[in-house]
Image: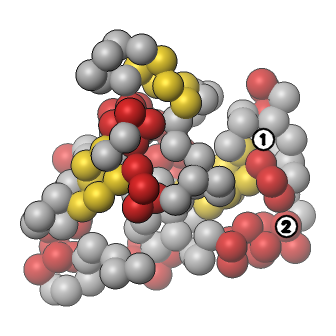
Amino acid sequence: MSYIPATLRKQVTQAARHRCGYCLRSEELMGMPMTIEHLLPEFLGGQTVEENLWLSCIRCNQFKGSQTHATNPLTGGTVKLFNPRYQKWEEHFEWSTDGTMIIGQTECGRATVIALQMNNLEIVVARRLWVSVGWWPPQD
Ligand SMILES: [Zn+2]
């Protein structure tokens, strides 16, 4: 993984509003900094430049790994993963009624939810607690 200069890290963190571009959990809720992820992985030629970086929690980053595409669960076809820098979260995902699950609204959203395991047991349990105290889902 490339060294990311502090000024670039700060720019990306501010643009992403201190939260994961995929699951939207914030540094404030996590009590720790997010990771800077390469949207196009470095080994596929992705560069360490602002346009190719976004903020991600460690879980989403780990589940994403080197994936750039995933399987559309409805058709079996291959679709590009959601790109939090260039796509709007609310156009591809929504919260379940109880606020604990991310529901994909497009083929990109549905494939990304599965590929990044965005409703894994640990995060759903955490979201349930956050909902119970009024901290979740995020309102903006
Ligand atoms: Zn995340």
Q: Residue at x 26, y 76 (%)?
A: 136
- Inspect this view and state whether residue 13 appears: yes
* Residue 121 picture location, percent across and down: 20, 47
- Residue 106, placed above or below residue 10: above
Element class at badge 2: helix
- Residue 99, placed above or below residue 124: below
Q: Residue at x 34, y 77 (%)?
A: 138
Instruction: Note whether ligand 1 is within 8 Å of mark 1.
Output: no
Q: Amino acid at mark 2?
A: Leu
Discs 1/2, front: 2
Element class at badge 1: loop
Farthest residue in the bottom direction?
Answer: 134
Image quadrant occupied by the N terminus: top right
- Residue 2 as seen in the image, left or right of residue 58: right
Q: Marks 1/2: CA distance?
A: 15 Å
Q: Nearer the viewer, residue 23 or 111?
A: 111
Q: Which residue is mark 2?
A: 8
Q: Amino acid at mark 1?
A: Met
**What is the quadrant of residue 68 in the picture?**
top right
Instruction: Note whether ligand 1 is within 8 Å of mark 2.
Output: no
Q: Which residue is mark 1?
A: 1
- Residue 10 as seen in the image, left or right of residue 21: right
